[in-house]
Image (tube, rainbow, N blue to C red):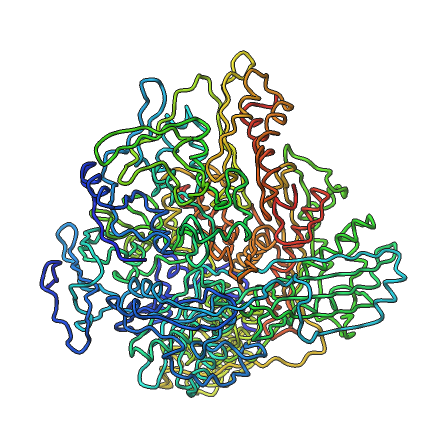
Amino acid sequence: MHPFSYTKAADTREALNAGRSGGRYIAGGTTLVDLMRETVERPGTLVDISALPLRQITVTERGGLRIGALVRMGEAAAHPKVRTTYSVISQALELSASAQLRNMATIGGNIMQRTRCTYFRDVTAACNKREPGSGCAALEGFNRSHAILGTSDQCVATHPSDVAVAFAALEATVHLLGPDGKERSVAFADFLLQPGSTPNREQAIRTGELITAVEVPALPRPLRSGYLKVRDRQSYEFALTSAAVALHIRGGVIREAKVAAGGVGTVPWKLPKVEQHLIGERPSASLWTAAAEQASDGAHPLQHNGFKVELLKRTVERQLRIVGGDA
Amino acid sequence: MSPQPQAAVGAPLSRVDGRLKVTGQADYAADRPQARTTSLGGTPIIQGVVHAVVVDSSIAVGRITAIDTTAAEAQPGVLRVITHLNAPTLPYRDNAGSNNPPGRRLRVFQDDRVLFHGQPVAVAVATTLEAAQHAASLVQVTYDAQDSSTDISAPDNPTNTPQTYTRGDAQTALASAAVRLEMTYRPARNHHNPMEPHATTARWDGDQLTVWDKTQWVIGGTQTELAAVFGIPVASVRVIAPFVGGGFGSGLRTWPHVTVAALAARETGRPVKLVLTRRQQYFGAGYRPAYEYAVRLGSDGNGRVTAMTHDIRSETSTYENFAERGILPLGQTLYNTPNVSQTYRTVPLDVNTPVAMRGPGFATAAYAIESAMDELAHELGIDPIELRLRNEPEADPSNGQAFSTRRLRDCYTTGAREFGWSARNPTPRSTRDGDWLIGTGMATGMYHTLRAAAQASVRLDADGTALVQSATIDMGPGTYTSMTQVAADGLGLPMRRVTFRLGDSVMPNAPLHGGSLTMASVGSAVQNGADQLRQQAIQLAVGDEQSPLYGADANSVVVQSGRMYVSGDPSRGETYERLLARNSRDSLEVLGSYSPAQSRFTIDAYAAVFAEVAVDARLGLVRVRRMLGVYDAGRIISPKLADSQALGGMVGGIGQALLEHTVTDHRDGRIVNANLADYLVPVNADVPDLRAIYLDGEDREADPIGVKGLGEVVLVGVAPAIANAVFHATGRRVRDLPITADALL
Amino acid sequence: MSTELPNSPPPPAEPSQAPSRRTFIAASTAVGGAVAAGALVAGPAPLGAQDAVAADGPPNGEVSLTVNGKRHTLTIDNRTSLLDLVREHLGLTGSKKGCNAGACGACTVLVDGRRVNSCLTLAVRLNGAEVTTIEGLARGDRLHPLQEAFVEQDAFQCGFCTPGQIMSGVACIDEGHTRSADEIREWMSGNICRCGCYVKIVRAVEQAAAGGK
């Protein structure tokens, strides 16, 4: 680990000042410290933001949820409001990492977490995300865990978060506070960036900007939702594929459908075609199958992850059935 | 001599070192520097320990053309960066008695050659761990890289001279067999991944070297190897390892980092602590090699296997030829097949050298053979257990010797009954539970009973307590506890009055702690020592005019709770304490020993393993629902601990079958999943309720205490039982391990 | 008793070893008025004057935290993890380093009552924190019920993951994630046991959660 100076911000102003001068924010630290130890990350200054007042979960005026950036994953998952109104968020969180890590990692840090691509994490390997222009060792390397959607010839790394898949499905908004004190909001779909030709740019966040909250919009009730995570090991592993599904069914008809997939995209992968296929239809096994058939549209499988094309469809199909019922 | 009452042996006792382990007081190799006295250890304080961090090569083959250590050495706290450019020449004498395979072992920092990805090329030593880690990351190494070959499946790999075995005429028998099957199985490379990373703390006191090391063999392994590497007398090296945080074979050799630690300590004049990172475990120590195992099998229509051929290839390094001793016996001894031919080739690759891993060879062979037998059972429509019974030999088919004890039939019968095998619908893909396809499978396990010469000192003190010592290891099976049990019964003392110590090269010699031979070997030495000492005390008593036992027949005297008495007349006796006090003896001491005798018998431990799995019909996920192992392992010294060991073997087998796979990027020999997030081992949620049954019994032909070894046999057979269950669940035969969703979609 | 205060002047550097480095200063004070013994057990083992301070050492910070009821005020390298702090500086080697990457749980300790991976926790961030390690669980000679249960159930073999398992299990019970064996399995999955003692770990947690036997 490279040496760094450390400062703990007493309040938001202090944090922003330090951020403006190039300080790197640290919240839970579970990704950052890990990557610093691998020398993938080499910040000169760490700005500890854990004392900032960003730890509330509140119901918004419109009936959505605003989750403070520093709410820990475990707290968010267990929060009664989250559990009862957006079980997809609770489930995604509780299927992530371990109880210990969920006690440390925060919501803001979670969506900022960096890929698990083995070549990214190994500073002796070529990686355009870590070192632009050095190449992508994963393209022709061992890429079983890599993305089939949203890839480029520069990068095929997946975004590893689970809860970000739920946020993508639910069309959340990320609230940011700039070093100039100005707030702005970015739609979740625009917040995490596909690699394109600049895989080193991962989020639509500006230097010194602080995530203050993630807001989940109100959705019509009743809302059934849930998260399915497919992985080799039963726990404590990143997803091979995953699906976040939320359905509003009234009068036997699907009125709203929110669907996104994880483990397959360079960013959490929203599935609008699947959603459109569902809306206005009556739940049925054949509907789930037909809708999920489009989940992998546009996929570019690599040598070792071709199975994800089919697995993704089946994951989405299964989760539609789990949430929407067998009827 | 009257048999001693058995009180401790066979009782379900808790570990004697349990309290230390649950309070964090058990000291492992990297825990040494702290001053602490434990009831088991009492190790010296190490003053002024500094830290060493190894720099690994980032190429597989080639030469180092330059190393720039300037930035590293400029870091605050850095004492030294050692590379081949400034390292002293080390003698690296041969060490024939160790576990070094044939070849020329890797010599750290002795030249500019790189032989595998991850080879140590430098070490940074600093006063703090943080400084040493940072300095290591600043060492700039420039290479002239050459093309590397790391893929055992690549065509045209050269191979080392094969080992072969033949009986009968397998080719002819195959040609005339009613049923012929031909399959190739590919079990992946596995890493031991003990939870404790390899670690060494080294200190020189003049010419004397002391290391606190994670090792499974303090004397024959680490002590002799360090003496050979540094060209110093064996007596100048002391190796201490009172606790080892798992090994599974990874501690059976002295890996390069041990030399690095000792070298760094000598060069800096400071005690040095070196702990491999988890990543470095993957190339800093050995692994279970990947295999290609081709089986051809011929049978008549009734399931009598007439011929089996085994064409086996495993990976090894270019500098050492690691050929697994255990890969061939199963194919020769498990079934009564008249025509057998085996060819075993190792493939030298640009990788580090493999080493034995739990159930070495046998586990791999069992996966192939027991899968093949399951395929045959399915082909013939014969129940898998029935098929095995039809091929069960009466004597060892490889040499005609009788088996000492072989109770596989009992294992099958007991297992079938307890598992509910008779309720099984033999048709694959016939049982469903919602989204899950349910299948059951079984397989046989076997491991040869190894024994080696061992010694143990036994001392009885005037206060009626005993100290027993042997330079063996406890990497988890419970050596501390089981040896205390044997000694307690042999001496006629309660457990709490006996202390067993291990893990120090100054103690009486013990063989490597592996191959399931510790209980048989060290246990027999302990028993011998305890018997000798008891006899000595009894002789003293019966010859002592003031003893109530004076004149008694020594052979009629037994000892219980520290009191010697005539077995038919319990009132006639006295305690050890009284005897020693009256005779002004501070203690009695003997050296117990054991040397394995040549046997006319074939001696093996056996297992029948049963597994039930659920396979998600659409998602391809495999979940083990329940498992049962039934073992013929001879006498069970410590039932509570033996149970834990069996369940642990099943968990290891679940990993081997469904999760574990060391992945190498063959472009440059890099291991791409060298961490515990990507190299998957089972977690708690993967493991259902497991059950183990040990058949009552003993095998006095094996060794004086009647044990046949546990640690290996409980793993062998687990992976094929699971693989067979997956086939039964899905109708799909996967011949690669691990079996993952990719193959089952 | 003499304790070296964080701001006291550094001991003189040893001239023969240049550049000499100060890596660490510690002062140990007691919580609740009692005087702590063995104040200066700090440092990467006692290094003495030869490793004394240098102005150009790595960036460090002062932190005051309570470990197992004992207050420590220390100046530490910013890079030092909580795990390395307790192991290398406080001599509490019960917490283990299995992966140093949050992937095994062997380093699990409680910080302010919550289980965390101490390997991914920077110690300099823990001002005012209360840390409990495996060494702080027993009350004198009386083991914590979960420690007793681990011994009785034989929920370990090599023992290396055991401190982390027990700390995690204590938290698991406190959190109430013990309503079924499956729930325990899931909530104990952040602690890898390579010896494969999971069945018995679950039994031990069940036993302790049920209040002993």
User: How many numbered callouts?
Assistant: 0
Using the image, determine if residue B472 lies above or below residue B618.
below
Instruction: Identify which residue is drawn at 73% across, 38% down.
Output: B430
Using the image, determine if residue C50 lies above or below residue B195.
below
Q: Position of residue C18 (x, y in %)?
A: 19, 74
Question: C130 or B344, which is in the foreground?
Answer: B344
Using the image, determine if residue B620 lies above or below residue B130.
above
Is residue B550 found left or right of B181 in the rendered image? left
Is residue B556 found left or right of C154 in the rendered image? right
Instruction: Identify which residue is drawn at 35% across, 70% down.
Output: B68
Question: B179 or B636, which is in the foreground?
Answer: B179
Instruction: Identify which residue is drawn at 49% across, 19% down.
Output: A256
Q: Split into 4 quadrants, where in the image is the N terminus of chain C?
A: bottom left
Question: B219 or B726, which is in the foreground?
Answer: B726
Using the image, determine if residue B510 lies above or below residue C199.
below
Tell me the quarter of the picture where residue B298 sits: bottom right
In the rendered image, is residue B572 in sight?
A: no
Is residue B683 found left or right of B391 in the rendered image? left
Q: Position of residue B390 (x, y in %)?
A: 81, 58
Q: Position of residue C126 (x, y in %)?
A: 24, 49
Q: Position of residue C122 (x, y in %)?
A: 28, 51
Question: B297 or B290, which is in the foreground?
Answer: B290
Q: Residue furthest top?
A: A251
